[in-house]
Amino acid sequence: MYDRYCILATAMHLPSWEESSVRQFLDQMKSRMETKALRLHALLPGISLESSRDAIARASVMLDWKRLEEQFELVETPDDFREQAWQFIDTAAAWFQPSDDDMPLAALPRVVLRTFADRLASTLAIDAPHAYQLTAELMGARNWLELAGRKPFVPIAEPLYSYSVRVIEGQEYAHLEPCLAARRQDEEFEALTVSRQWVFQGDAAQNESADRPSLLCAAATVVRCRLLDGQHELVDWKGRAAIAELDRIYPVDCRRALAPRSKTHLFYVQLRTALYAAYLHTGNLDLAYAEREILVARGRDYRADYERLLKEWVPRGSKAHERTALRIV
């Protein structure tokens, strides 16, 4: 998990603990949290400084400020820090000090601060807009829109992705182009896989896919998490729901390869890889072969990606049979 903390720390421009002792680093980070507690005390009339500290701690997944101090005191060595990486991922929002140049925030800091704002709303039992405004001001912004930018609306009646054929270096490729909202949603769900433990990733992705099953990163996330949980029927349900929506714009029998170097296409390949693995787990080999053939045809330029996943997900010795017919579209 420490590698995820490093990704997060880099994205949020946090100082490196390796440049000083672990104790000095944590003292510096606790000072940043104390500053935010003082700011919250000033922003929220009637709240005591003690409650303000506890609110910052709870929004950072600590029981209270006293527990936060106790946990920080237990970290004495670099190995201690690495072992508690998830704890520090949860406190990163309260350590963050964005500059004007950082606003509006990139996807990963934006997701982390949105989570912090949601926790602050729950901790203080206040309405979400108030919590988001407080979070923005704690970070030095005038309001949430200045901090995070305007979030594009997700269309309801129209597909979230469009299909086209593109020529790259003289070769035709299939291309899935997300609308602006889908692109942002996919970016944020990818960020979620860094900032949240996988069990929470699955719940968030499942909630999102209930209304928008074709959002590719959310769909790929929920089927991956449910596959790792052994919930193969749920993988089939959620995966098929996403594919059905995408089939509105993606020719069903198309075997043209997806264009390389696309995050959108990688999410699509991950989704179909999870379906293939689930069918092998349940012994549904006819459907497994259909998925395998789609992977081979459409995911030609992502073979290393799906084969790496299959080594993790597929039962050893499993094989699929029964061919299906795909054609160039």
Image (cartoon, rainbow, N blue to C red):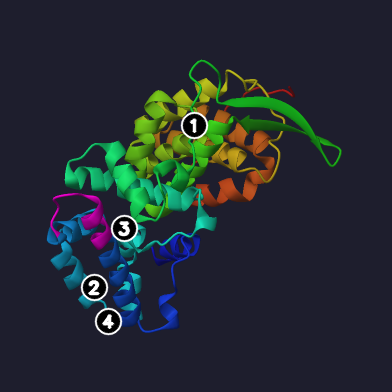
Q: Is residue 314 visible?
A: no
**On residue 38, which mark appears?**
none
Q: Earlier in the sequence, mark 4 or mark 1?
A: 4
- Residue under label 2, please give it: 72
Helix, strand or loop at mark 1: loop
The amino acid at mark 4 is Glu
Compare residues 9 and 146 and report the one nearer the observer: 146
Contact, mark 4 vs mark 3 (Cβ under 8 Å): no
- Residue under label 4, please give it: 76
Q: In this rendering, is residue 52 above or below 67?
A: above
Q: CA distance from mark 3 to mark 1?
A: 26 Å
The amino acid at mark 3 is Asp
Q: CA distance from mark 3 to mark 2?
A: 13 Å
Helix, strand or loop at mark 3: helix
Q: In this rendering, is residue 212 above or below 1?
A: above
Q: Would you say 218 lies left or right of 64 here?
A: right
Q: Would you say 191 lies left or right of 202 here?
A: right
